[in-house]
Amino acid sequence: MAPSLPLSGLRAVLAPSALRFHRALRQPEAAQAACLARVLQSVAGSLQAERIPGFRRVRSARDFQDAVQWVTPDALTPDVERIAAGQARVLTREPVLRFELSGGSSGASKRVPMTRGLLSEFQRALAPMLFELLHRRPALREGASYWSISPLARKQARTAGGIPVGSAEDSAYFSRLLRPLLSRIFAVPGEVGALPDVESCRYVTLWHLVAREDLTLLSVWNPSFLTLLMAALERHGERLADDLAQGRCRPPETGSTDAVAAQRTVLARMRFSPHPERASLLRAVLHGDWSARALWPRLSLLSMWTDAQAAQALPAACRRFPGVEVQGKGLLATEGVVTVPLFDAPAPVLAVRSHFYEFIDSEAPDARPRLAHELEQGRTYLVLLSTSGGLLRYRLGDLVRVEGFQHATPCLRFVGRADAVSDLVGEKLAATRVSAVLNAVLPDLFGGTRPGFSMLAPEWSPAPSYVLFLETDASEARLAEAADAVERALREGHHYGYARALGQLGPVRAVRVEEGARRYEARCIALGQRAGDIKPADLHRLTGWSDHFSGVTP
């Protein structure tokens, strides 16, 4: 069947949800009241509800704010452990279908419980977003799409209580009604994510993408993901061309014997037919001054993060795609959706029918958090999220700025993390995590104490990575040993480890500095801080420290 036929059916299925969403944009206060009622109903009868004094009397948003304290991700750890062990009705009345991994304020992996109610709230945002793409960009109805949703090389696991960790398919966030239609338009089968290593995932992904002349959409998260995918195409191009011509797929075999066996098992479930014309075109493109448009002439849209730190990686990602429209993604966390992109909106619009939202004014953090209909243009807020998955007044840590309104609903641009988190490519490295690592690792290597000056900071050049600055007389070998030890510890965090596995981040490297504290202070003063307010930092999120300590900058 031609791709346009399932896409036409998909558009028809999505239309009712999109219509309800656009109607809700005119009345955000009423839409949010309905979301809060749904959240309260999902939590009623749970252990969490029993702990909240007066929970049964909560009716309005003000009642809710008065009765429930906002929480950080770490505060939910005991309840998550109860769920993982098999206890029911902990956060909600609904059973937990699976856990998804997210990063917490400590940098360690956090398990987010997914329920049918929470997935339904995701769908209330994703369905209008998909409809917007198909309705406003008709060319997307005529071809295949690539959606990078789930992590590459994902490993399925279960908790002690038998709850799955991670989803098996990228379509798992969509309703069962949509999944058969989506499977027919996805250019890359979901089984690719089950391959045991990132390099083979990329190879098989590229095989399927190059085989599709009708590719119209590439949707990824961080722009560097796309940059690395195109680099792999150059690296493996000739091998890919041979495989396409022969109707086979031979990704690099790396790792243990078990990993190779797992790779072959996954590949055996896929079908690879010959594409000699595409193989010839790939060879011609690789031997010229190539752009991706030569491979995919119908490609019309790139969807990816474009705000905050992601903007740094955007030019490199777009280099191979001249003339292709770029749409910035909304703000979507593992815990829930905050905004969705609309083509005519000044910024992604609040997913007003999904969850219940509150906003802490960054200039008045002690004031009562504002509701969606109370936000002011130009102001910056910290997001609190309440969902049918049992998260109540959950502090996401994301800062958003009001860029305007779509009808009466605020349009919010992501401006960064409110907490001390460095996030070049999605690694979400928290200062608390870095402090714990440096305190644990460095004393053993430097005579029982940390060096007089030690700090980790990100750098974009020569490639995104972290630099460990140390003021010490120890040998270069000992500095390298320290960098390796810090790197190993940081990779225990889910997001940092994943960014490293993807190749989006390089390894930690150590750099010797002299008069570290003085020169640190000098730069902080140059950046506008008062000398009396400057505090030592185990993690400084600003780049450029390598140049500063080497004397390139004042």
Image (cartoon, rainbow, N blue to C red):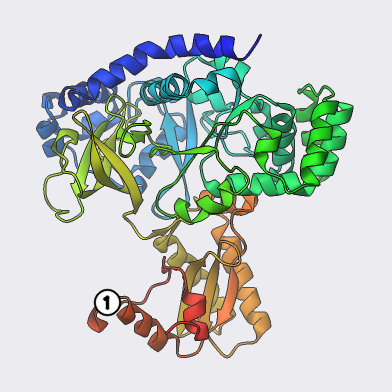
- Residue 171 placement (x, y as % from top left): 54, 23
Q: Quadrant of the C terminus?
A: bottom left
Query: Can you say whether 465 is above or below 83 in the image?
Result: below
In-image side of 163 versus 430 (left or right)? right
In the depicted structure, whether residue 132 falls above or below residue 371: above
Helix, strand or loop under label 1: loop
Q: Do we see residue 196 in this rendering?
A: no
Q: Is residue 522 above or below residue 458?
A: below
Query: Is 552 displayed left or right of 343 in the figure?
Result: right
Amino acid type, mark 1? Gln
Is residue 13 or residue 96 the one in the foreground? 13
Q: Position of residue 333 (x, y in %)?
A: 41, 39
**Mark 1: few/some/many CA within 10 Å (<14, 14-19, 20+):** few
Question: Can residue 342 be seen by looking at this rendering?
Answer: yes
Q: Nearer the viewer, residue 63 or 237?
A: 237
Residue matched to label 1: 529
Determine the residue positioned at 65% across, 37% down: 293
The N terminus: image quadrant = top right
Q: Report which quarter residue 505 is drawn in.
A: bottom right
Left or right placement of residue 127 versus residue 408 in this view? right
For residue 411, which quarter of the picture?
Answer: top left
Residue 159 vs residue 118, the one in the foreground:
118
The relative height of residue 162 versus residue 488 in the rendered view (above or below) is above
In the figure, is residue 183 to the left or right of 272?
left
Residue 413 in percent (x, y) is at: 32, 44
For image coordinates 66% across by 83% down, the residue present is 476
Residue 126: x, y in percent?
Answer: 42, 25
Number of marks drawn: 1
- The residue drawn where x is 30% and y is 81% is 525
